[in-house]
Image (cartoon, rainbow, N blue to C red):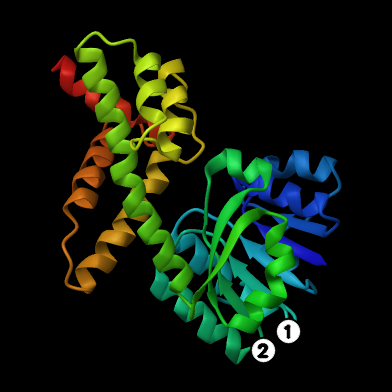
Amino acid sequence: MQIGFIGIGVMGAAMARNLMKAGHSLYVYTRTAKKADSLVAEGAIWCPSVAACAQDRDAVITMVGYPKDVEEVYFGEAGILEHAKQGAYVIDMTTTDPLLSVRISKAAQEKGLHALDAPVSGGDSGARAGTLSIMVGGEKEDFDACLTLLSAMGRNIVYEGKAGSGQHTKMANQIALGGAIAGVCEAISYGKAHGLDIQTMLDSIGAGAAGSWQMSNMAPRMLKGDFAPGFYVKHYIKDMDIAHTQAEAAGQRLPVLEQVLAMYRELADRGEGDLGTQALLHYYEGRQES
């Protein structure tokens, strides 16, 4: 397929690379052109604008930062919806507002396009390995038509329901993630306070009921002092803000989400928004020092 890919960040670059490995022709655009250099060197074709990237493609995939970025690349005279060819698939893999995904879907239908919201989970390691979990909302026949394409980037690819359902599922993922990563940080903090060998402790509890993806993948990074972003703190705050807003709209109160969101906001206020989510350990270390 002829694929337009917009947004070459920490995860987007690896996802785009896997599409090329699967044999697709890749056209790329990102606001910081330098980020696409390695992909272009490997055979991707650079496009100077969103419009150029979307024109004449069989599918256009977006993996940008914030809802405002999604809105910018899809709508308006220079946007994807205005320039994608009739019958093309437009797949937003950004984690964004479910209501925005519904808007994109309706606008796409009016222009003869097929829209899917398909946020992912699995971090930078999953993006590189092509093992992402992909949660997809939209029309079932559009999901079926794009399943092979999505399979180049992920392993656990699930149709969640109508437009916006992929994003709502990702919100549930982010809510569950908050409790899991905070639990790992608290366990490490507790172990240090009581003089345990932390690696031995993690080997012990990770093999039992307390084990989790966060414990297996993020705890080793914490112990090495590796806080490089597989997923940015600032982007996780964005996700939790969306989840909190959607919960409030449904008349819900989610106290764990609220507490973890407050912790991450404190990290961002301290200038740590560009670190990975495993940097939540700093919140506990800071509390102990104070």
Quadrant location, the N terminus: bottom right
Q: Residue furthest front?
A: 208
Circle 1 SS class? loop
Quickly name the residue at label 2. Answer: 112
Name the spot of residue 212 as percent of width and height, x first. 41, 39
Q: Is residue 182 left or right of residue 75?
A: left
Whether label 1 touches label 2, CB < 8 Å: yes
Q: Sequence order check: which comes first, mark 1 or mark 2?
A: 1
Q: Nearer the viewer, residue 8 or 192?
A: 192
**Residue 10 shows up from this direction:** no
Q: Residue at x 50, y 60 (%)?
A: 69
Q: Nearer the viewer, residue 266 or 250?
A: 250
Quadrant location, the C terminus: top left
Name the spot of residue 157 as percent of width and height, x first. 59, 62
Q: Nearer the viewer, residue 228 or 186?
A: 186
Q: Which mark is on residue 5?
A: none
Q: Residue furthest left?
A: 290
Amino acid residing under circle 2: Gly
Q: Residue at x 17, y 23 (%)?
A: 287
Quickly name the residue at label 1. Answer: 87
Q: Is residue 38 left or right of residue 65?
A: right
Asked which quadrant contains residue 276, the reply is top left
Q: Residue at x 71, y 51 (%)?
A: 16
